[in-house]
Image (tube, helix red, strand yellow):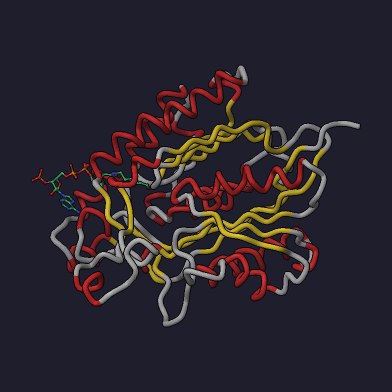
Amino acid sequence: MSKITAAITAVNGYVPDYVLDNKELEAMIDTTDEWIITRTGIKERRILKGEGQGSSVMGAAAVRGLCEKRGISPEEIDLLICCTVTADYIFPATANIITDKIGAKNAFGFDINAACSGFIYGLVTGSKFIESGSHKKVVVVGVDKMSAIVDYEDRTTCIIFGDGGGAVLLEPDENGFGIKDSILRSDGSGFKHLNQKAGGSAYPPTLETVKNREHYARQEGKAVFKFAVTNMADVSAEIMEKNNLSSDDIAWLVPHQANKRIIDATARRMGVSDEKVMLNIEKYGNTTAGTIPLCLWEWENQLKKGDNIILAAFGGGFTWGSIWIKWAYNS
Ligand code: UT7
């Protein structure tokens, strides 16, 4: 019997309607449209408004559409993995909330917290359930409502992030399509450069933590930038070398969308030209675990069966990695 690989067989995305553009940010903080575009490539981002509206709202919408596209019932899903740093609640897992919302009664689910690398961690995890033969339909959701943890008084951080996400369906393939290889890494010493200090068990919420604005994401942008540029580029080049892939073999690079300059450096290192790089940071900013599925969703119609695609991400933790996929279908 031939080896089972995990193939992506459908993709869907979801972004909320509200557009927060650079002009609106200019009125909120000391910044300019020109600074933001030059330093990050971002023009606007989406924001999920409304009380009680968490990441699961976007995740559920993405998965409902995913099932419709593939023509399956949510009850056919065996496992749903939700990758997010903005879970609806500390517990239960947002995956459980999504499965309940969509009626995926036969799925078990759990969350993965790997920040901006969440989706690639989730995709590799999900693929193992398919490759082992134990599960036939695995959904991986990457979604974040970053507006819930962004301090809109902190100009070094709030300009980057937005809300949104997407989902993919993984199914078994016996013809060599799907996830071919992956490299995942982490380094917890990166904690100090990018974190949300309070709200967990180390610093539970108190009046003091709220007063000190410690429930927001903080980053030392320059330090994170330096680590991101090096590691995302290295790991993307490494997966190519490991699998004897030349830049001509690569149809698409799907990079995490944190900063256009980081993406450009990664593409240069891989020798991949701009036309092969999925880039939608301009419209959505950094949606953390949402960026890669949002790109796949937007470019799905241009992907061809057999295309070699490299996914690459870097984020809080630090976490980073790359995945080589042989695309499994024509839309
Ligand atoms: O997604 C996962 C992880 N996150 C990342 O990968 C983000 C990585 N970091 C970055 O993308 C960039 O570091 C930022 C976009 C966050 C910042 O860009 P930078 O080019 O590294 O700027 P900087 O922090 O070195 O600041 C340069 C100057 C400073 O002014 P002085 O000290 O030179 O006078 C900042 O105060 O730009 C100033 N500045 C701003 N000016 C206008 C910082 N933020 C802003 C702003 N508008 N929003």
Q: Residue at x 58, y 52 (%)?
A: 297
Q: Relative to 303, is 205 above or below?
A: below
Is 44 placed left or right of 65 in the picture? left
**Which quadrant of the figure contains the N terminus?**
top right
Counting from the top left corner in percent of width and height, residue 27 is at 17, 68
Counting from the top left corner in percent of width and height, residue 296 is at 57, 48
The quarter holding residue 98 reads: bottom right
Residue, far front: 202
Residue, far right: 1
Q: How many marks?
A: 0
Counting from the top left corner in percent of width and height, residue 71 is at 79, 62
Is 161 placed left or right of 99 in the picture? left
Counting from the top left corner in percent of width and height, residue 218 is at 27, 55
Q: Residue at x 67, y 48 (%)?
A: 126
Is 175 placed left or right of 48 in the picture? right
Q: Is residue 252 visible?
A: no
The quarter holding residue 62 reads: bottom right
Residue, far left: 30
> Which residue is nearer to you in this view: 95 or 153?
95
Q: Is residue 46 visible?
A: yes
Is 25 placed left or right of 145 in the picture? left
Q: Residue at x 51, y 49 (%)?
A: 118
The quarter holding residue 161 reads: bottom left
Q: Relative to 167, is 275 above or below?
A: above
> Which residue is nearer to you in this view: 309 or 125?
125
Q: Residue at x 29, y 34 (%)?
A: 226
